[in-house]
């Protein structure tokens, strides 16, 4: 098992609102978290999550998000890990914020702990469970089921 301290920062146990990764690639929008707290003792961080648009208006995305988020190259979409309870356990799903459509889509697949690294076209890459039984993630938005859509 890896040590959390050995992970490349920012990562699910160490991120905050001051990091450049929360600002869109085009510099117009950003993701903002409320008070970050551990999901459980020694677990990754979570908080309510907001999209701050180019006019400075905050739009609520979800009450229980992890991070850090990852923006696509154009700065028009962001992938955000979101916590949920499933069958008596806590898991993560991916929420994709679409700036042009002003909506947030939650996808069905469940993960242990997401550490997102790139967002290119329809592909989100990173790791599921970066410290224990790590799996490489290649999440193809065009092939996954959307289970909820929220207008922002």
Image (tube, rainbow, N blue to C red):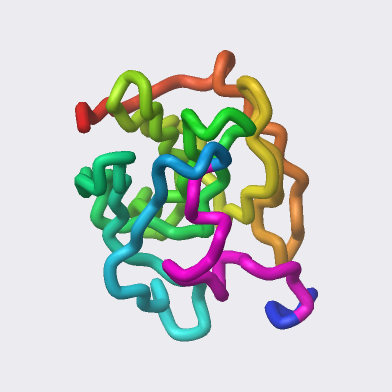
Against 1, residue 67 (above or below) is above
Q: Residue furthest top?
A: 142
Q: Position of residue 101 (x, y in %)?
A: 32, 19
Say if 136 sits above or below 143 in the image: below
Quadrant of the frame with the N terminus: bottom right
Closest to the observer, 149 or 145:
149
Residue at image coords 56%, 22%: 141
Q: Please state which of residues 38 and 71 is positioned toward the viewer in this rendering.
A: 71
| Quadrant of residue 85 within the rendered picture | bottom left
Query: 54 and 119: which one is in front?
Result: 54
Residue drawn where x is 27% and y is 48% of the image: 62
Q: Residue 108: where, in percent of width, then height?
A: 44, 31
23 relative to 87 in the view: left or right: right
Residue 48 appears left or right of 146: left
128 vs 102, nearest the viewer:
102
- Indicate the position of residue 21 as horizontal and vertical percent values: 57, 56
Q: Residue at x 42, y 38 (%)?
A: 95
Residue 83: x and y, percent? 39, 54
- Reply above or below: 69 against 71: below
In the image, residue 12 lies in the stretch drawn in magenta: yes
By secondary structure, the bulk of the magenta-drawn segment is best described as: loop
- Residue 33 inside the magenta-drawn segment: no
Marker count (numbered): 0
Q: From which residue to which does the magenta span run?
A: 6-24
Q: Residue at image x 47%, y 70%?
A: 18
Q: Is 102 placed left or right of 5 in the picture?
A: left
* Rendered-image quadrant of the C terminus: top left
């Amino acid at each position: 098992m890896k040590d959390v301290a050995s992970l490349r920062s920012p990562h699910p146990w160490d991120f905050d609102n001051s990091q450049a990764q929360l600002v869109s690639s085009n510099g117009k929008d950003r993701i903002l978290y409320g008070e970050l707290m551990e999901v459980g003792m020694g677990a990754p961080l979570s908080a309510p999550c907001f999209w701050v648009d180019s006019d400075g208006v905050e739009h609520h995305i979800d009450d229980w998000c992890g991070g850090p988020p990852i923006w696509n190259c154009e700065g028009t979409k962001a992938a955000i890990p979101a916590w949920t309870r499933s069958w008596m356990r806590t898991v993560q799903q991916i929420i994709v914020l679409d700036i042009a459509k002003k909506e947030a889509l939650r996808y069905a697949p469940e993960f242990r702990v997401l550490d997102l690294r790139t967002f290119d076209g329809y592909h989100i890459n990173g790791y599921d469970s970066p410290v224990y039984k790590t799996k490489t993630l290649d999440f193809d938005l065009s092939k996954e089921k959307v289970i909820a859509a929220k207008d922002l």
